[in-house]
Amino acid sequence: MWLVRAAVVVACVLSVGMAVASERNACGCYQTDSGACICDKKATCGCPGSCEPQGCEERRDKALQKEIELETKKAREADKQRAVPENEAAPKADAQPAAPRPARALPPAQVKQLAKLLDLYFAAHPNARRETAGDLRDEIQRAR
């Protein structure tokens, strides 16, 4: 008889325990009827506005403050990079423009090819012989 009573008590305790366990949130905490928050030892943060382990709100606040400081620092650095110093803003009056680079010499095979190409072009365009090389180049570029 006492075995049956023990079994009934164990069943009641297990059912109450299961009810409490089923009320736990994703963080591993549950709220009692009195409003107290009770968490497992392995409870984690991540349930804002719900029952959470102590200190989770403070950790979130610290993380938010660090993120704000980091973004502010990035914005300041970007502003510094965009700002042009006054001594670099205006070009120097005594500065001379850079000398043009000398053209590289063509190998003899390319000189022969160029001469043949010019002969072919002049045969097709007899009036082009009176133009300068720059004018010819511009005209060829426009014809493309």
Image (cartoon, rainbow, N blue to C red):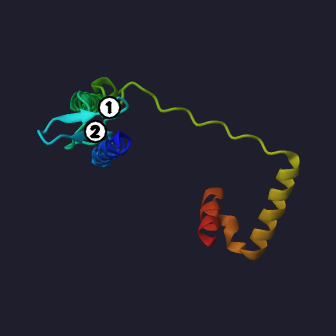
Q: Earlier in the sequence, mark 1 or mark 2?
A: 2
Residue at 65 percent across and 66 percent down: it is: 140
Instruction: Pick out the residue farthest to the front.
Output: 1
Compared to 118, does 52 lie above or below?
Answer: above
Query: Left of 80 or right of it: where is 33?
Result: left
Report the amino acid beneath label 2. Answer: Cys
Question: Which residue carries the number 1 mark?
Answer: 74
Question: Which residue carries the number 2 mark?
Answer: 29
Dot 1 falls on a residue whose secondary structure is helix
Q: Quadrant of residue 1?
A: top left
Compared to 41, does 22 lie above or below?
Answer: below
Query: Left of 108 or right of it: where is 43?
Result: left
- Residue in the foreground of this view, choosing between 19 and 104: 19
**Which part of the image, by quadrant, shows the C terminus?**
bottom right
Q: Position of residue 31 (x, y in %)?
A: 20, 41
Q: Position of residue 113 (x, y in %)?
A: 84, 58
Residue 90 shows up from this direction: no
Q: Are marks 1 and 2 in contact (CB under 8 Å)?
A: no
Dot 2 falls on a residue whose secondary structure is strand
Query: Left of 127 or right of it: where is 75?
Result: left
Q: Position of residue 4 (x, y in %)?
A: 36, 45
Report the amino acid beneath label 1. Answer: Lys
Residue 62 shows up from this direction: yes
Q: Quadrant of residue 90?
A: top left
Residue at 28 percent across and 34 percent down: it is: 39
- Residue in the foreground of this view, choosing between 36 and 52: 36
- Residue in the foreground of this view, choosing between 132 and 46: 46
CA gap, disc 1 and disc 2: 38 Å
Binning the other alpha carbons within 10 Å of mark 2 as few (below 14), some (14 to 19) or many (20 upward) gives many
Which is in the foreground here, disc 1 or disc 2?
Answer: 2
